[in-house]
Image (cartoon, rainbow, N blue to C red):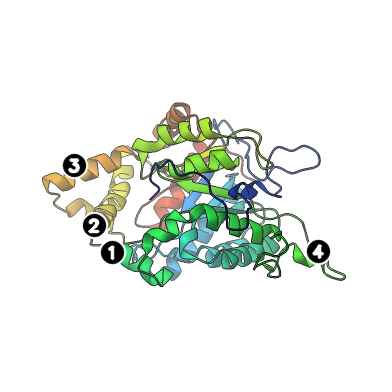
């Protein structure tokens, strides 16, 4: 994950600063005929816009196909109840998380939704060639015009050995250290604006802007807005310096939330994308009919994370298995700390917890992730939260 480092933003090799990431998007306030594709609008009586992060979790006794169908059902529910956006995250070599290919999943979700914004939370940039990401998200933009977000992270989204297999190199630090240059290259591919004489000046990401300049070509100038994701300070600072929206992983790095958001706001420079900071935080939350039932559900995710952190990744355990598990003293400490970062309980308890989180952090948007064994509990949770905030059924 991101480290709170003081790296300076460097050039991408052709004299073009990484600040090119500010380039031509439709993000920003609605002015001068430009549509805001970054900021959301709070619905009902929610304090900020509410969104959804889905990990496509696979529980014991369930298949990946069932997990993907559940993700479609959650996306459709989120759209129907007025959640602002729906993101999926890149993970690898984890049996309980079937989201190794965000672009593929997003294409599937685009075919089953009409209005909700869809995006990556995120694509791990060091794992991929920037041109490939530009092509994938250009294709998604063509499938779902005006509602695709490109969230980027600099961590591998997996363990070191798997990262080496993905990148075909043993030099794992190289990808993360080169993140600013990779970001600049990706941005130039998205905008199709490498300068003359650059080795890539005759290479074009398709679908993309080049089609508008081809004989008889018609192509929207819009492209997915770039978000930077992080769990500590590096991406917070970089997002601020580039004037980009920032998403922080509060759901697994709660101690760093406020310092990272403060750093983002302090570093922020207005850009063509945003004239003021816009920070989203991921929040783990699950609502159920009773507090006891909510705890029963979130305990499955806590046990799953305990196993992952101790080198025993697997499918998400059932509530019965989690209840029957005997936790050792250190394991109990881990679980208690983990559950302490989750907002769970009845719908009113969850609403109060999310309200407090928004107030404490000053977040501009809350992206809720509900981790539990079964899709039924997750679907019910989002419905209860929508009801608690009076979100209209669209």
Res 292 visible = no
Label 4: element kind: helix
Q: CA distance from mark 2 to mark 3?
A: 14 Å
Labelled disc at residue 212: 4
Q: CA distance from mark 3 to mark 4?
A: 58 Å
Residue drawn 31% across the image and 63% down it = 315
Labelled disc at residue 307: 2
Pointer 1: what residue?
314
Determine which quarter of the picture holds residue 295: top left
Q: CA distance from mark 1 to mark 3?
A: 21 Å
Mark closer to the chain start, 1 or 3 = 1
Viewer-nearest of discs 3 and 4: 4
Label 3: element kind: helix
Label 2: element kind: helix
Label 1: element kind: loop
Mark closer to the chain start, 3 or 4 = 4
Q: CA distance from mark 2 to mark 1?
A: 7 Å
Q: Are marks 2 and 1 in contact (CB under 8 Å)?
A: yes
Mark closer to the chain start, 2 or 1 = 2
Judge by depth and name the residue closer to the eye, 277 or 111: 277
Labelled disc at residue 192: none
Residue 353: x, y in percent?
40, 32
């Amino acid at each position: 994950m991101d480290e709170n480092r003081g790296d300076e933003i460097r050039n991408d090799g052709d004299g073009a600063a990484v600040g090119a990431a500010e380039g031509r998007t439709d993000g920003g306030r609605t002015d001068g005929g430009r549509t805001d594709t970054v900021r959301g609008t709070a619905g009902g009586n929610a304090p900020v816009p509410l969104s959804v992060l889905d990990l496509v979790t696979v529980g014991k006794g369930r298949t990946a196909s069932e997990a993907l169908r559940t993700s479609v059902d959650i996306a459709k529910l989120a759209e129907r109840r007025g959640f602002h956006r729906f993101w999926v995250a890149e993970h690898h070599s984890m049996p309980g998380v079937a989201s190794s290919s965000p672009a593929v999943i997003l294409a599937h979700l685009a075919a089953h939704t009409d209005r909700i914004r869809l995006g990556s939370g995120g694509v791990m940039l060091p794992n991929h060639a920037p041109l490939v990401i530009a092509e994938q998200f250009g294709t998604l933009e063509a499938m779902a015009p005006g509602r695709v977000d490109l969230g980027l992270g600099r961590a591998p989204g997996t363990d070191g050995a798997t990262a080496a297999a993905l990148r075909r190199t043993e030099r794992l630090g190289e990808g993360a250290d080169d993140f600013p240059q990779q970001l600049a290259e990706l941005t130039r591919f998205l905008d199709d604006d490498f300068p003359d004489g650059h080795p890539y000046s005759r290479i074009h990401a398709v679908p993309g802007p080049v089609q508008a300049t081809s004989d008889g070509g018609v192509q929207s100038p819009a492209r997915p807005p770039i978000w930077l994701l992080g769990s500590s300070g590096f991406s917070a600072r970089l997002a601020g310096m580039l004037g980009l929206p920032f998403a922080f992983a509060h759901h697994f790095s709660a101690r760093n939330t406020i310092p990272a958001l403060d750093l983002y706001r302090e570093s922020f420079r207005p850009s063509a994308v945003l004239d003021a900071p816009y920070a989203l935080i991921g929040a783990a939350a699950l609502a159920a009919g009773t507090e006891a039932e909510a705890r029963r559900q979130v305990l499955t995710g806590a046990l799953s994370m305990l196993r992952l952190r101790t080198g025993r990744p697997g499918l998400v355990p059932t509530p019965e298995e989690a209840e029957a598990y005997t936790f050792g003293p250190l394991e109990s400490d881990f679980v208690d700390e983990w559950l302490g970062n989750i907002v769970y309980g009845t719908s009113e308890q969850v609403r109060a917890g999310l309200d407090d989180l928004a107030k404490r952090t000053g977040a501009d948007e809350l992206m809720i992730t509900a981790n539990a064994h079964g899709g039924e509990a997750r679907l019910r949770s989002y419905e209860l939260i929508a009801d608690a905030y009076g979100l209209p059924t669209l």
